[in-house]
């Protein structure tokens, strides 16, 4: 088990290894934030089985490895990016190579007025005062040692700021390209997304790395949606199957704002996504959806904390998983409805399709309700492929592997169909189908 | 093994089948010629569904003796999908819902799998859509149902028509229609029967498994068989079905005993 001592020594080691990479020109206020976060880290508990939020997700494997920052992260790999381009996907494209913004590979020249899309490094240098107002306004820097590392080792990320009533005509596409051959790199991108009142945008994040490269991607994204703002936020995690991936997403919503988060997780040896969402003003809505597939030597974890602090907000959380081989998944969805949050609506569901006996899911939907006039529900299912369905398809001439894949795609369709960008939906389907090809020894329930 | 008459489509000899350790079919014999329509009737529990499930290769049906040859080929040695490739089609009593699987995609996958197995070229999306629309019109299936998930939320009649549509697409040599009439009102029954009649041809044999004579008013069989306790106990023409309708199944077992 991870002891406090072990955790601290790993933390110190990564902090030292990553510091060579930190920003040259750090504004004074940021230095202070970083100093405080690092100091607070000494008080943080160990992330082991005794820690409720980490009970089923061991960090032992991660802590057995050490990582360094990539000194040459500015390198270009046009071929890799070309390979990732979705056909007919018209976007403002930003590429981060090993966590650092890469201007040569990025193409977003024709942004409309009122939109800022730039590297965090640039924004900190040119507009430190504006950044001081939004940095850390939604995130908890000291959630755990990983958010502290992200804060302390900031060297890049994105700053997205959209002015009042501006609607982005095309999605912003962020590609996190991970190139890690001989060394084990770590990257801690930090993103700030601010949508001013009435602004509307779509953000697509794409995390990629070629198997078998080993690295630790640890991003932290802060999203602030002001009144009537709307953000659609797609995340496609297709990391190397030997990588560690941690995403911490913090969302604050003002009145009548809408956040739709759709997260697809296919890659990584160890991948965890945390959503921390707060309703700060009334009549805001959010939808969090996710799909995960896990096979041998993979663990995927989704942790949601949605806080209905005020009245008349709606949230819908729907996550589905397909597990095979010895794959492991963790789902922990926590919805809090404060006593003043009357007329709240929350629906939480997690469905898991187990293709093998050795796969494992630990699922924990939690509704914590203090208001008395609410509509809330939660449900969890764990099932297997239905032998009657397989027989029906085979009796129509469809071979078993194809039938199984079609049924799994059918199971996933509810999530995939939420993607309203066709090239992205098709790409996600391709990755899903590829992932299902790894299913070698199916077992069917009786 | 290939001692069948040249115009025989299906030859079942001494077929003995166990389900959960209990013998359900006791040495069943049946010959079906090309182009013929046979009705198999019988009381509940007589083994009608066991016969159709065994022929289509469902798990859990243990063949302990006998054989079934489709066009001279050992049917029981084949996987379920291979039986479909060889031209066997089973229209199910309870067509299965496939949530999330688009009806059109399902049928195209099915038809192309069968075409591949027969060494024919696959149909591209456009040709397939044309074909499936034309066939759907023939069986009076609302084209909107093609865009929905397979059988999901379909009415009883729509599910049965969807089965007949698949049969029309796959053009099987031997179709087994398992209680296709169950749960249908008279209008739906007529539409389904019309669809089946349209598929009658000299190269296609049909087995109608049914509990009631009613279906046979619309689809006239060449032969009627009565299944009882896992054996064919009586065979005749459609007059046999009428007699069963009037007198029930009791007299058959009575005569057997006598």
Image (tube, coloured by chain):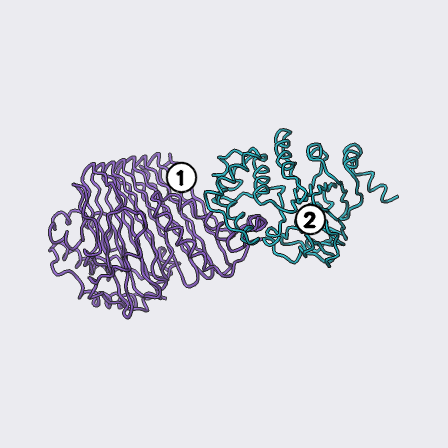
Chain colours: A purple, B cyan
Q: Is residue B2 left or right of residue B91?
A: right
Q: Which of marks 2 and 1 is in front?
A: 2
Subunit of label 2: B
Q: Which residue lies furthest to the top in this view?
A: B187
At x 76%, y 36%, the residue is B238
x then y, percent, for residue A107: 21, 51
Q: In this view, does B167 lie to the left or right of A256?
A: right
In front here: B202 or A310? B202
Circles 2 and 1 on the same chain: no
In front here: A379 or A75? A75
Q: Mark on residue B50?
A: 2
Give the distance between the C-alpha atoms of the residues marked 2 and 1, in whole angstroms. 46 Å
x then y, percent, for residue A426: 38, 48
In front here: B55 or B22? B55
Subunit of label 1: A
At x 47%, y 48%, the residue is A381
Question: Which quadrant holds residue A54?
Answer: bottom left
x then y, percent, for residue A251: 27, 46
Q: Quadrant of the N terminus of chain B?
A: bottom right
**Label 1 sits on residue:** A376
Could you tell me which secondary element the residue under label 2 belongs to?
Answer: helix
């Amino acid at each position: 088990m991870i002891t406090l001592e072990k955790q601290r020594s790993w933390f110190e080691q990564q902090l030292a290894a990553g510091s060579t990479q930190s920003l040259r020109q750090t504004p004074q206020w940021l230095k202070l934030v970083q100093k405080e976060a690092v100091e607070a880290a000494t008080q943080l508990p160990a992330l082991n089985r005794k820690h409720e939020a980490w009970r089923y997700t061991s960090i032992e494997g991660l802590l057995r490895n050490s990582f360094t920052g990539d000194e040459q992260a500015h390198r270009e790999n046009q071929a890799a990016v070309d390979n990732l381009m979705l056909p007919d996907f018209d976007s403002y494209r930003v590429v981060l190579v090993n966590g650092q913004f890469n201007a040569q590979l990025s193409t977003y020249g024709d942004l409309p007025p009122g939109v800022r899309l730039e590297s965090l490094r640039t924004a900190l240098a040119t507009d430190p005062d504006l950044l001081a107002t939004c940095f850390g306004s939604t995130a908890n820097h000291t959630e755990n040692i990983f958010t502290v590392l992200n804060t302390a080792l900031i060297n890049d990320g994105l700053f997205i700021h959209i002015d009042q009533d501006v609607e982005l005509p095309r999605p912003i596409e962020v590609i996190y390209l991970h190139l890690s051959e001989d060394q084990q790199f770590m990257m801690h991108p930090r993103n700030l997304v601010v949508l001013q009142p009435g602004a509307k945008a779509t953000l697509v994040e794409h995390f990629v790395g070629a198997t078998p490269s080993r690295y630790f991607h640890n991003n932290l994204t802060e999203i602030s949606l002001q009144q009537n703002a709307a953000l659609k936020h797609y995340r496609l995690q297709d990391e190397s199957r030997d990588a560690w991936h941690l995403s911490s997403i913090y969302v604050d919503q003002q009145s009548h704002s809408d956040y739709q988060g759709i997260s697809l997780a296919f890659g990584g040896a160890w991948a965890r996504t945390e959503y921390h969402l707060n309703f700060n003003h009334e009549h805001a809505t959010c939808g969090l959806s996710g799909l995960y597939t896990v096979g041998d030597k993979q663990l995927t974890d989704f942790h949601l904390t949605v806080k209905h602090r005020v009245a008349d907000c709606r949230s819908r959380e729907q996550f589905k998983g397909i597990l095979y081989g010895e794959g492991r998944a963790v789902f922990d969805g926590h919805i809090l409805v404060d006593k003043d949050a009357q007329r709240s609506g929350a629906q939480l569901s997690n469905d898991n399709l187990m293709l093998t006996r050795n796969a494992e899911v630990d699922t924990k939907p939690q509704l914590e309700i203090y208001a008395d006039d609410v509509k809330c529900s939660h449900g969890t299912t764990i099932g297997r492929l239905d032998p009657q369905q397989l027989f029906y398809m085979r009796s129509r001439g469809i071979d078993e592997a194809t039938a199984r894949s079609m049924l799994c795609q059918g199971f996933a369709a509810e999530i995939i169909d939420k993607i309203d960008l066709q090239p992205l939906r098709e790409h996600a389907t391709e990755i899903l189908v590829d992932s299902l090809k790894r299913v070698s020894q199916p077992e069917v329930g009786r | 093994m290939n001692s069948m008459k040249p115009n025989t489509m299906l030859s079942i000899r001494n077929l003995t089948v166990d389900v959960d350790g209990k013998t359900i079919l006791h040495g069943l014999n049946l010959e079906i010629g090309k182009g013929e329509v046979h009705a198999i009737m019988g009381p509940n529990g007589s083994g009608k569904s066991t016969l159709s499930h065994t022929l289509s290769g469902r798990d859990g049906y243990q063949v302990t003796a006998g054989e079934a040859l489709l066009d001279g080929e050992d049917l029981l040695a084949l996987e379920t999908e291979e039986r479909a490739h060889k031209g066997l089609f089973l229209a199910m009593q309870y067509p299965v819902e496939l949530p999330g699987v688009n009806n059109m995609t399902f049928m195209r996958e099915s038809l192309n799998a069968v075409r591949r197995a027969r060494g024919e070229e696959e149909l591209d999306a456009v040709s397939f859509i044309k074909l499936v629309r034309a066939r759907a019109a023939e069986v009076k299936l609302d084209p909107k149902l093609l865009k929905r998930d397979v059988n999901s939320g379909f009415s009883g009649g729509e599910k049965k028509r969807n089965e007949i549509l698949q049969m029309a697409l796959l053009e099987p040599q031997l179709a087994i229609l398992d209680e296709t009439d169950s749960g249908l009102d008279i209008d739906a029954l007529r539409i389904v029967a019309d669809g089946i009649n349209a598929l009658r041809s000299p190269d296609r044999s049909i087995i109608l498994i049914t509990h009631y004579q009613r279906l046979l008013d619309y689809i006239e069989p060449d032969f009627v068989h009565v299944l009882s306790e896992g054996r064919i106990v009586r065979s005749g023409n459609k007059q046999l079905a009428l007699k069963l309708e009037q007198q029930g199944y009791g007299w058959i077992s009575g005569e057997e005993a006598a």
